[in-house]
Amino acid sequence: MEARSQQRSFPFQNWASAQTFIETQFPVAKLSAEAYKERKAGASQTLTGLGKWWGRKPLVLVRAIILGLLLPATDDPKKDMEVFLKLMTMDEEGLWRRKNKSIPKQRLIEELLKMPPHTRDRYLVPVNDGWELKKLGRAERQALQKLVFERMPYSEKLRYCARPEQIDGPSPAAWEVINAHLGTHAASLVELVQELGERRFGHRPRVGDAFCGGGSVPFEAARLGCDAYGSDLNPVAALLTWAALHIVGGGEEVARQVQEAQDQVFQAVDDQITAWGIEHNERGWRADAYLYCTETTCPECGWQVPLAPSWVIGEKTKTVAELTPDPENQRFEIEIHSGVDAERMARAKKAGTARNNRLHCPHCGMSTPMEVIRRHL
């Protein structure tokens, strides 16, 4: 095979002292885009469900660093980069395998209009003052998606791709190229890490993080097959790292056990809350959420005034809060109304009691600077 004919012999006896890939080159721009995509994924990130950690490192960056430290720098830097990108599924083939969303029609048309007429006319037909896609078969639609996808800049491609950790690594064809270049026999990242570690260190790689924080480094190192160690003076960080390794990394059976335990705790708490009548009203309705605001005393009339810049609760549901005077207690009750008309919505927007850094009292109508209110808190 072609990949076999390109196989090179690397002096394995010198691996312990040989330069690593990360010491000679690193695809910083592409990795920055990958890291940004992962961090913008919010709650769908692999470890965030365990608990928030403000300094959590992107897993894709940890993976890249570990592989970059294990891969040797050969006398063919261009091939080294090609192999590294294949391992990260950041090469053209890997990105196409990761693609899990369709490029919208308008974006396809926009790109086709930049192409030569013979290519454009295969997919587009003029309609009035614009263009429209022709009716295409499944294979043609797929070919068009790939044509436009390959013309996009790297960061835009990522909008339509899963993250590297969400697929099972390089394809069989990519592994042939990787093994041919490195002289390895791996079919997975774990196997490659084991083999590279034994060649460089004489044993499986060991990764330690003395300031492990949210656990990204030990977790990704363990997922790649390294012996992973982590510690932190903050007990919350240590707990998050332990959970990352033992719960997220524990497999389906551990996840099932944790889910069962969570369900039992939830049900016990729910039963007690229902028995106490908390979160329920006289009709038996259950609250989905609670809203709150600060209440302060108007210095002009002495009434307690709840502070809010607007009393619109939900634009789509046309839900507003309305203040009802309670003269006996010199305060306001807050009533919630849904499905109100446009006039009440407009009134709720303008009826905020905290506007332009001033208190606007709905009882006496006076306006007081917030600086005065704070001075008397």
Image (cartoon, rainbow, N blue to C red):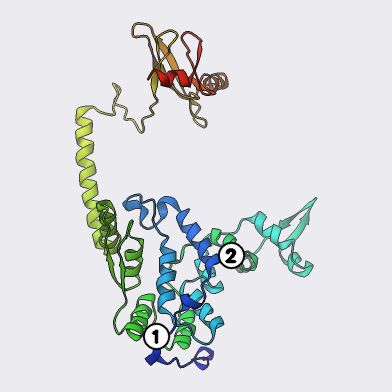
- Name the residue nearer the viewer: 333 or 11: 11
Horizontally, residue 108 falls left or right of residue 230, namely right
Residue 214 % position (x, y): 33, 56
- Name the residue nearer the viewer: 92 or 16: 16
State whether residue 228 is above or below residue 269: below
Residue 84 % position (x, y): 48, 76
Quadrant in the picture for residue 106 = bottom right
Task: Give the crowd class for mark 1: few <14, some 14-19, many >=20 residues within 10 Å.
Answer: few
- Say if residue 34 shows up in the picture: yes
Secondary structure at badge 2 equals: helix
Circle 1 residue? 17
Residue 154 is marked as: 2
Residue 202 % position (x, y): 30, 85
Quadrant in the picture for residue 143 = bottom right
Upstream in sequence: badge 1 or badge 2: 1
Residue 212 is marked as: none
Task: Give the crowd class for mark 2: few <14, some 14-19, many >=20 residues within 10 Å.
Answer: some
State whether residue 223 is above or below residue 349: below
State whether residue 243 is above or below residue 65: above
Frontmost of labels 1 and 2 is 1
Horizontally, residue 369 falls left or right of residue 44, namely right
Q: Residue furthest top?
A: 328
Tag 2: residue type? Tyr
Tag 1: residue type? Ser
